[in-house]
Every structure is written in C-alpha cells, then in structure tokens.
Amino acid sequence: MRDALGEVQSVLVLGGGSDIGRAVCKRLAQGRLNKAILAGRPEDDMESVAADLKAAGIDIVELVTWDATDVASHEEVIGGVFDRFGDIDLVYVPAGLLGDQDAFDADPVYAAKVAEVNYSGLISAGLTAAKHLRAQGHGVIAFMSSVAGLRARKSNFVYGSTKAGLDAFAQGLGDSLVGTGVRVMVVRPGFVHTKMTEGMKPAPFSTTPENVADLLADGLTKGTEVIWAPPVLKYPFFIFRLLPRAIWRKVSAKG
C-alpha cells in the first residue's frame, strides 16, 4: 500500500523487459519503491532489468513468466502475484510490439499477432489486474498508449490501430473504476529512444525513457489521467485530429 506520503511502494510491470519499465522503476526507487515484480517472457531480457533495479536499491525484485497472448494464464499469473506479494500499488503495462507496416502488408498473420499482443492480450491483463486492485481497494493501472493511436497514418496504421483500441479501452476501464479506489492512467508518448526504436529516424519531439518515467511519476503524484510525453505533443495532435481526411493524408504521408 502507498505510504503516508502517497508514494508507490510496489509495482507489477507487465512487459518486464521494457526499457521504459526499467526507467519507471528506477525513478520510483528514488522515492519509496521497495518491491518490483517483472512479468514477461524468458526471452525479454528481464534479468538485466532486474540487476539494474537491485543496483538502484529496490529490496525485492522478482521475475514472473507472463505472455500477453496466453490469456488463459492471466488469472493464474497476475492473481498469483497479488496472492504471493500482497498489495500492489501500481500495475504498469508497457508490453507491446512496434512492427513495420511493410512487414504487416506482406504477412497479415504477423499483423494479427501484433494486434493480439498490443490490444486483445492487454484487455485480458487489464481486466484481470483491475479485478485484484478493486478487491484490495486501491491502486493504479498505467497503460502505455501512443500518439500513433490518436489518428492512424498510412505508414503505421496497423500499429496505430492497436494503440487506438488500447487507449479507448483504458479510458473506459478508468471510468468504470471511479469510486472503487482504483484509477487508470493513459500514457501517450511520441517517439521514445529505446531498443524497440533503435535504428529508426526519430520523429519531432522525441524523448527518452527517463523523461517518460519522470512524467509518469509526476502524474502518479497529481492523479493525472492522461500523460503526454513530452507534454508539447498534445497541441499538434489536437489540430491533427481536426484536419479533414484529405488534408491528413497529405500531412501524415510526410511522417
């Protein structure tokens, strides 16, 4: 449970090998975080994240095998974390795949798999986590959405559509939890310099995992529902969503 100052003391990361997840836990370790449960696949390099978090001073760092697409196991895995470790203050959900639109066009099965990881698997995980947080009477679920989900572009419309769905799901879940002591945070980053984006041309207003972590930590303190990373992105995307479709095709084709 959060301490008397409202600081997070325990976190479950669904996507435990994430660079941003690593940064978030290290940022929260500057406060009172003393328990981090990293959930992911064995190939997700969670061991290196765990080593960093222990070096950052987090007392308890545990690895749990979890796969977003294995929805039948979500209750056992996520529920097992609550049963084993007690109250969880924050469930952070950075799990997801970026992919490439050309690859999706060439292999629709691959496109559907990415959609399963980025959207349908996280619906199952999110609802499962919400059930256990509601039972304990407090907590936050933070979903990693993306500005790519606010309006689909020709160059990444499969990925963008998965984030659009996740963003809508997260907002609806948050509305359904009002009054329960549990709340949902939606994080909308732009281009973040991580291993997932390595080798890609940075978009304008690109940022780092550490900056996203700072914004998330600040949002936890303030009770923010939607976080833009960086905050300046809210302004161009307000305009982008209002553009006539014919104009948007031309504008977005340049991105």
Image (cartoon, rainbow, N blue to C red):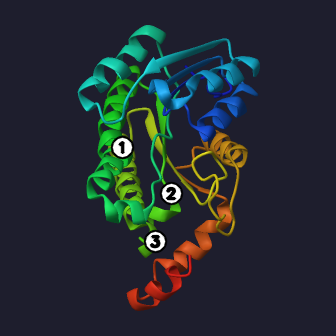
Quarter of the rendering containing residue 232: bottom right
Q: Residues within 10 Å of mark 1 (few under 14, many from 20)?
A: some
The kind of residue on which mark 3 rests is Ser
Quarter of the rendering containing residue 106: bottom left
| Nearest to viewer (mark 3 / mark 1) | 3
Q: Which residue is mark 2?
A: 146
Q: Which residue is mark 1?
A: 117
The percent coordinates of residue 134 (x first, y second) are 36, 28
The percent coordinates of residue 202 (x first, y second) are 66, 64
- In space, the residues marked 3 and 1 are separated at their CA atoms by 20 Å
The kind of residue on which mark 1 rests is Val
Q: Which residue is mark 3?
A: 155
- Residue, far top: 84
- In space, the residues marked 1 and 2 are separated at their CA atoms by 15 Å
Q: Nearer the viewer, residue 50 or 58?
A: 50
Is 74 left or right of 44, judged from the image as shown?
left
Q: Secondary structure at mark 1?
A: helix
Q: Residues within 10 Å of mark 3 (few under 14, many from 20)?
A: some
Residue found at x 31% / y 36%: 69
Q: Residues within 10 Å of mark 2 (few under 14, many from 20)?
A: many
Q: Earlier in the sequence, mark 2 or mark 3?
A: 2
| Nearest to viewer (mark 2 / mark 3) | 3
Q: Earlier in the sequence, mark 3 or mark 1?
A: 1
Residue found at x 71% / y 24%: 52
- Residue, far front: 106
The kind of residue on which mark 2 rests is Ser
